[in-house]
Amino acid sequence: MSAAAESIRPAGSPATSVTIADLLHEPAIMLGAGSAVMYQLAVWGVGKGVAQHSNTMSRPLDRLRTTLTYVYVMGLGTDDEKAAIARMVNRAHVPVKGEGYTAFDPDLQLWVASTLAEVGLQMWEKVFGPLDAATVEHLYRDGQIYGNALQVKPEMWPADRRAFEEYWARTEADFRSDEQIRRYARALLSTRHAKWFVKPVIPLTSLVTRGNLSPQAREVLGFTWSERDQKRYDLLWAAVRRFYPWVPRWIRRLPADLAMRDIRRRLRTGRRVI
């Protein structure tokens, strides 16, 4: 375990030698889960596939569990576990296709994987402060597993972090949606059709998700953002930075550890994983 992840530092202090495992053992990183999804929806091929095939609205907790299964196993699992989960994801992706898109498109998968790695990094730095360039480069290379486990070839990834930032900017400039995608994105952050057990957290989820997005992503998905929203968002993150790092490390580790324990139990007993 890295010294950065073990120590409790004041917000804003730099961290070094952070690994993907460190990121995944910080539940605060999950404050970026919604914005990762929204960044994915802002690329038309991904957005169309999700809007037309996702069952998140009817099975929100199960979809969260299966998504986190992929995220956790790719960062914390053994090679055999990664291969098993990748096969399951590929099977689940078979019906996800339509005019102009398919879940097996490597370029779309590259973008999805990029959002997982990039948003995780953004959330870490929001909580703990900036990482040094060498650590960011290391995390970038390790984060490629999220795409390479599926159809993304290693050579498809930008050569280094600087090239990745240029790739992100180009993709952001080409964000595109349609009314179906925008309607689906709004539904994810609305209480109107949400399950009763999800409704209480949606206002906070909406604020964090919309606030984490770039102006380009908010615009293409049709999200509003006001000065009042910005003030509430800034206050929220100030509170997280102030109090979260003082939560004992063993408590912060629990969500990832329990998730991996459940995943391994499911794999061992033949229960549905993905």
Image: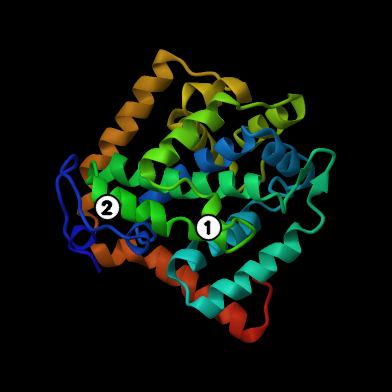
Measured as percent of width and height from the top left, residue 247 is found at: 24, 56
| Color scheme of the displayed model | rainbow
Look at 37% across and 67% down and name the residue there: 254
Q: In this picture, is 117 found above or below 19?
A: above
Measured as percent of width and height from the top left, residue 179 is found at: 75, 24
Q: Quadrant of residue 39?
A: top right
Location of the N terminus (image quadrant): bottom left
Left or right: residue 20 versus residue 5 is: right
Instruction: Between residue 238 and residue 196, name the one nearer to us.
Output: 238
Q: Which residue is mark 1?
A: 154
Decide: few, some or many residues near mark 2? Use Cα within 10 Å; few <14, some 14-19, many ≥20. some
Measured as percent of width and height from the top left, residue 152 is found at: 60, 55
Left or right: residue 243 versus residue 124 is: left
Decide: few, some or many residues near mark 1? Use Cα within 10 Å; few <14, some 14-19, many ≥20. some
Q: Secondary structure at mark 1?
A: helix
Amino acid under label 2?
Thr
Left or right: residue 211 versus residue 6 is: right
Between disc 1 and disc 2, the foreground one is 1
Look at 61% across and 27% down and name the residue there: 175
Outermost residue toward the top in this view? 227
Q: Secondary structure at mark 2?
A: helix
Q: Quadrant of residue 130?
A: top left
Instruction: Between residue 146 and residue 209, name the one nearer to us.
Output: 146
Q: Which residue is mark 2?
A: 135
Location of the C terminus (image quadrant): bottom right
Measured as percent of width and height from the top left, residue 127 is found at: 28, 43
